[in-house]
Image (spheres, rainbow, N blue to C red):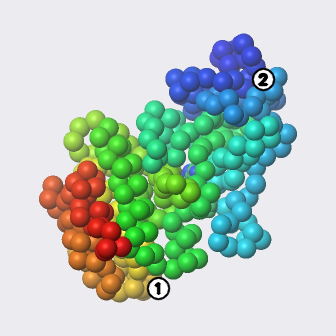
Amino acid sequence: HGLAPLAQGEGPVRYGNVADMLSFINLMSSTSTATLSHLQEEMGVLLRTDMVIKEGRYRIDSDVTLFPWKLVYRNPGSGHIPKGSFGKVHLAQDATTHKRMACKLIPLENFKASDVEIQARFRHENIAELFGVLLWGRTLHLFMEAGEGGSVLEKLESCGPMREFEIIWVAQQVLRGLEYLHGHNIIHHDVKPSNIVLMSDKAVLVDFGLTVQMTGDVYVPRDLRGTEMYMSPELVLCRGHNTKTDVYSLGTSIVHMQTGSPPWVRRYPRSSYPSYLYIIHKKAPPLEDISEDCSPAMKGLLQRAMDRVPSQRSSATELLHEEALHPSRDEQ
Ligand SMILES: Nc1nnc(-c2c[nH]c3ncc(-c4c[nH]c5ccccc45)cc23)o1
């Protein structure tokens, strides 16, 4: 079935580099599910030796254990499994090294190589690192860096609006990740609180299922990508957009972090507005949803991050130099 190369050498699961992982990923997305479902054993490529392969195997429940994510804030019983754009995310732990990871399960029929290609090829401390890809049966398992502090959305739902110094800390990290992606003409397309996850020392962007790398300086979408509330007016118009759309989505995410609600929903209740696309098109930016206690510096940052005109909107690099993100000691 053309799978021979993977069966050679040290077995169907092996250590490799990003190029090996990418060729495995392309093999997966170009081989029929029928062919692959006859495979008896798991197969794949791991990038790190703290995921311990034994006799060419990396078995669920003996070499690695998956847990429904134990929530940081909610009672463990809720068993809440964060859902990505294309799959469920579990907590995973290597049985030998006890290394803890996130593991996203993607059914093979939903899998496209582009889901992980960008995350594999472009690495940055504020982007969830990809540790390995394994096929078990008909499900692809993506092992990644885990944000054990949960997502910013989960923190907001459990602890309410964030204070400005917490928002500054998250915004700086996300903007560094966006500056890196945008520097490679990559649009994330789904920047929002549930796609920002927290570790003890940093915040990282997750879920690259909607990510694209632009070939020119504008990307004309075939379909609407992202989550409505955080969408920029130019994205909604579907006449072409660029990396600035992510900057706008970060702006709306900051509004959500400071008020506890996404923009628009308090003024236009979801019960009466099944879709916000028209509101965004007519009324963006949602400056009235900025919190009353927002500092003047942060308010200025939000105005420049959510400028209606993409060419006038600040870039991630420009926002990183905003005064709001460098409060003097006494302001804190
Ligand atoms: N869609 C997606 N694609 N990749 C990821 C991902 C990579 N590392 C992670 N670490 C934590 C979480 C996570 C999200 N919401 C949560 C709520 C509670 C606890 C943890 C989380 C998600 C990830 O997520």
Residue 166 position, x and y percent, is: 44, 69
Q: Nearer the viewer, residue 192 or 264?
A: 192
Helix, strand or loop at label 2? It is loop
Residue at 64% across / 49% down in the picture?
102
Q: Check disc 1 and report the residue beneath it.
A: 271
Q: Amino acid at mark 2?
A: Gly
Q: Nearer the viewer, residue 271 or 320?
A: 320
* Mark 1 sits near ligand 1, with its Cβ under 8 Å away: no
Residue at 76% across / 49% down in the picture?
66
Please identify the quadrant where the C terminus is shown: bottom left
Residue 53 position, x and y percent, is: 76, 28
Residue 265 position, x and y percent, is: 40, 81
How many badges with numbers are in the image? Answer: 2
**As drawn, 274 above or below 117:** below
Number of residues whose C-alpha sits closer than 10 Å to that of mark 2, classed few (under 14), some (14–19) or many (20 or more)? some
Q: CA distance from mark 1 to mark 2?
A: 53 Å
Helix, strand or loop at label 1? It is loop
Q: Check disc 2 and report the residue beneath it.
A: 56
Q: Amino acid at mark 1?
A: Ser
In the displayed structure image, the side of residue 23 where residue 298 appears, left or right: left
Tell me which label, 1 or 2, sits earlier in the chain: 2
Residue 294 position, x and y percent, is: 31, 79
Number of residues whose C-alpha sits closer than 10 Å to that of mark 1, classed few (under 14), some (14–19) or many (20 or more)? few
Residue at 76% across / 54% down in the picture?
67
The mark closer to the camera, 1 or 2, is 2
